[in-house]
Image (cartoon, grey):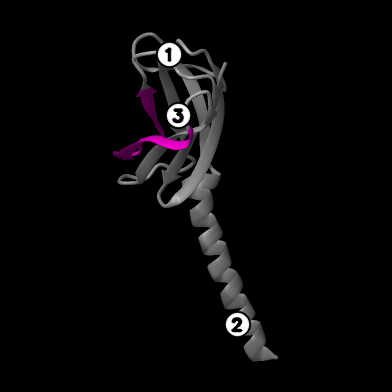
């Protein structure tokens, strides 16, 4: 029985370490959409945009800031009057220093088709998704 207890304890330790790493990279991350503030930066938090909101922002507040964390923001048209289940763009970024708030934006020169969209943030290999609509 002692051998099984040692293996169980070791397995639980590995689980706890992995869970803590996941929590620091994604579980502790707040991901939200924001309107443009008129100066190219994220403004008011929202999940609904109008077609004439040509620039949309995705903001990630990292639970634990680490220098060199690789982040990819993937923008998707999920079910729109135009494309459906189509990736629009990937934006890659690597954090610098203790940077804990990062964002990416996507700009369309003409109006956005109405419908459902999402942005998927891959933060250090783990993903978090925020959905939004254009109405």
* Viewer-proximal residue among 72 and 26: 72
**Measured from the top left, where is residue 63 in percent x and y?**
49, 41
Residue furthest to the right in view is 1
Q: Is residue 49 magenta?
A: no
The magenta region covers 84-106
Count of numbered tags: 3
Q: Which residue is mark 3?
A: 59
Q: CA distance from mark 2 to mark 3?
A: 41 Å
Q: Residues within 10 Å of mark 3 (few under 14, many from 20)?
A: many
Of the numbered discs 1 and 3, the one sitting upstream in the chain is 3
Q: CA distance from mark 2 to mark 1?
A: 59 Å
Q: CA distance from mark 1 to mark 3?
A: 22 Å
Q: Is residue 96 left or right of residue 29?
A: left
Q: Is residue 34 above or below residue 119?
A: above
Q: Which residue is mark 2?
A: 7
Residue 98 quadrant? top left
**Measured from the top left, where is residue 57 in percent x and y?**
43, 23
Q: Which residue is mark 1?
A: 111
- Residue at 37% over, 42% down: 71
- Is residue 95 in view? no
**Measured from the top left, where is residue 46 in percent x and y?**
55, 19
Q: Is residue 102 magenta?
A: yes
- Is residue 130 in view? yes
Q: Is residue 16 left or right of residue 91?
A: right
Q: Quadrant of the N terminus?
A: bottom right
Q: Are marks 2 and 3 in contact (CB under 8 Å)?
A: no
């Amino acid at each position: 029985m002692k051998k099984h207890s040692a293996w169980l304890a070791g397995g639980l330790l590995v689980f706890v370490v992995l869970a803590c790493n996941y929590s620091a990279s994604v579980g502790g991350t707040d991901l939200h959409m924001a309107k443009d503030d008129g100066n190219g930066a994220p403004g008011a938090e929202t999940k609904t945009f109008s077609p004439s909101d040509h620039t949309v922002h995705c903001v990630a507040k990292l639970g634990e800031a680490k220098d060199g964390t690789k982040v990819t923001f993937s923008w998707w048209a999920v079910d729109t009057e135009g494309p459906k289940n189509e990736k629009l763009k990937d934006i890659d970024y690597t954090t610098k220093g203790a940077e804990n708030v990062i964002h990416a934006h996507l700009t369309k020169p003409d109006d956005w088709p109405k419908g459902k969209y999402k942005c998927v943030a891959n933060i250090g290999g783990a993903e978090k998704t925020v959905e939004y609509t254009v109405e």
